[in-house]
């Protein structure tokens, strides 16, 4: 199918409508499918899930259900694919998809471990396939605005950063078996988003130290972790994560990206520099109007940013990549770099030693 838009001179320009298959009909798969329905120039080609109950989800989106990935790829091939499946399936499914030659968005984390992530990035390069990773928060206009202020020098040299990801997942969340297995704890599932945003805003993380607490719910995962960071720039940082704390300080509960989470109006990131500091996601900038001194007053400036669903923007980026009109906002290599940070965190927690982050 083709859609039309008007060019600068008023002329009609034909543009193809991009068909996108969503593999996995779980929570995030359904959100991707809904985003496709909202983004102009895209349509849901099919959903892929072995559970027959997923047929109701697909039908509600006006698309067929395919039981297997092979069935999807052997039929009317889509223009792009989204892998929204459990982490351990990303590598085998990604490798299977590369034969199509179409762009593939893989949900974060890119893989269950860095070895698998490297395999995906290298195989995509060999196949000539554009690989995108679902770190959707980078698409948020709040982040773009904060990065612009940092790059404009409004905070000066960044000295320290702090990120909180404290939230309380209900017990029913863990009824799904894989969520109690190694790699399904909040460090991989939640904190990888925060590590990715800190990399994006502050620069590369070069070493970490960490401690973890085993989950009180049982299983093979942690429920909490505390991490020290050293950035390539010399800045220092902390990250604290827990999925068992009743608290208002997490990106989920502060950024209003997902209506499923009630907004608290709090901040969860603090970025401090020699000339000022920013709190996020609100974007408040604190600076001394005169002498920089703790005895002098500070100005608090708010920078309102238009709200836009980053999942919609991520689908729009996938559409434009499929059309050959844009590069990925979050490439496979960027997803691998964030995965390497998390793998270093897990190693530091296991050994009790400082761990250098491996190069991608």
Image (cartoon, grey):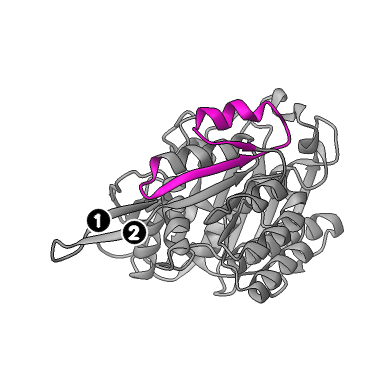
Q: Is residue 171 left or right of residue 45?
A: right
Q: Is residue 288 visible?
A: no
Question: Residue at point 29% right, 46% down?
Answer: 306
**Extreme-left residue of the structure:** 9
Q: Is residue 50 magenta?
A: yes
Q: Is residue 281 visible?
A: yes
Decide which of 175, 40 is in the foreground and name it: 40
Callout 2–callout 1 Cβ contact below 8 Å: yes
Whichever of labels 2 and 1 marks the residue nearer the N terminus, that label is 1
- What residue is shown with label 1? 5
Where, quadrant-wise, is the C terminus in this rendering? bottom right
Q: Residues within 10 Å of mark 2 (few under 14, many from 20)?
A: few
Check residue 43 in the rendering and tell me which mark sits there, or answer none: none
Query: Where does the image place residue 175, in percent across and percent down from the top left?
Result: 76, 26
Q: Quadrant of residue 56?
A: top right
Q: CA distance from mark 2 to mark 1?
A: 7 Å
Instruction: Name the element at disc 2.
Output: strand
Question: Residue at point 34% right, 63% down?
Answer: 149
Range of magenta residues? 38-65
Q: Quadrant of residue 66?
A: top right
Query: Where does the image place residue 72, in percent across and percent down from the top left?
Result: 65, 47
Decide which of 10, 36 is in the foreground and name it: 10
As drawn, 68 above or below 152:
above
Instruction: Name the element at disc 1.
Output: strand
- What residue is shown with label 2? 15
């Amino acid at each position: 199918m083709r859609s039309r838009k008007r060019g600068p001179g008023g002329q009609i320009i034909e543009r193809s409508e991009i068909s996108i298959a969503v593999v996995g009909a779980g929570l995030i798969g359904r959100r991707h499918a809904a985003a496709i329905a909202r983004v102009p120039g895209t349509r849901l080609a099919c959903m892929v899930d072995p559970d027959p109950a997923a047929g109701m989800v697909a039908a509600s989106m006006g698309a067929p259900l395919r039981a297997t990935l092979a069935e999807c790829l052997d039929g009317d091939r889509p223009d792009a694919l989204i892998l929204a499946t459990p982490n351990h399936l990303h590598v085998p499914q990604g490798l299977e998809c590369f034969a199509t030659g179409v762009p593939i968005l893989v949900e974060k984390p890119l893989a269950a471990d860095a070895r698998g992530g490297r395999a995906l990035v290298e195989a995509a390069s060999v196949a000539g396939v554009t690989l995108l990773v679902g770190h959707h928060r980078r698409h948020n206009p709040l982040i773009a605005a904060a990065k612009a202020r940092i790059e404009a020098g409004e905070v000066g040299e960044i000295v320290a950063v702090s990120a909180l990801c404290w939230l309380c997942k209900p017990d029913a969340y863990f009824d799904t078996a894989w969520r109690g297995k190694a790699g399904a704890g909040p460090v991989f599932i939640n904190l990888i988003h925060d590590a990715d945003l800190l990399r994006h805003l502050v620069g590369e993380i070069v070493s970490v130290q960490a401690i973890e607490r085993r989950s009180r719910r049982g299983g093979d995962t942690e429920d909490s972790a505390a991490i020290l960071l050293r950035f390539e720039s010399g800045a220092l940082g902390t990250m604290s994560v827990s999925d068992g704390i009743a608290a208002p300080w997490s990106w989920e509960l502060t950024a209003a990206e997902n209506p499923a989470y009630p907004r608290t109006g709090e901040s969860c990131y603090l970025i401090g520099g020699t000339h000022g500091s920013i709190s996020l996601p609100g974007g408040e900038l604190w600076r001394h109007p005169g002498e920089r001194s703790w005895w002098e007053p500070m100005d608090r400036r708010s920078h309102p940013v238009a709200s836009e669903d980053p999942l919609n923007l991520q689908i729009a980026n996938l559409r434009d990549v499929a059309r050959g009109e844009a590069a990925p906002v979050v490439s496979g290599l960027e997803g691998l770099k964030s995965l390497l940070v998390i793998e270093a965190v897990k190693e530091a927690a296991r050994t009790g030693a400082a761990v250098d982050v491996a190069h991608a």
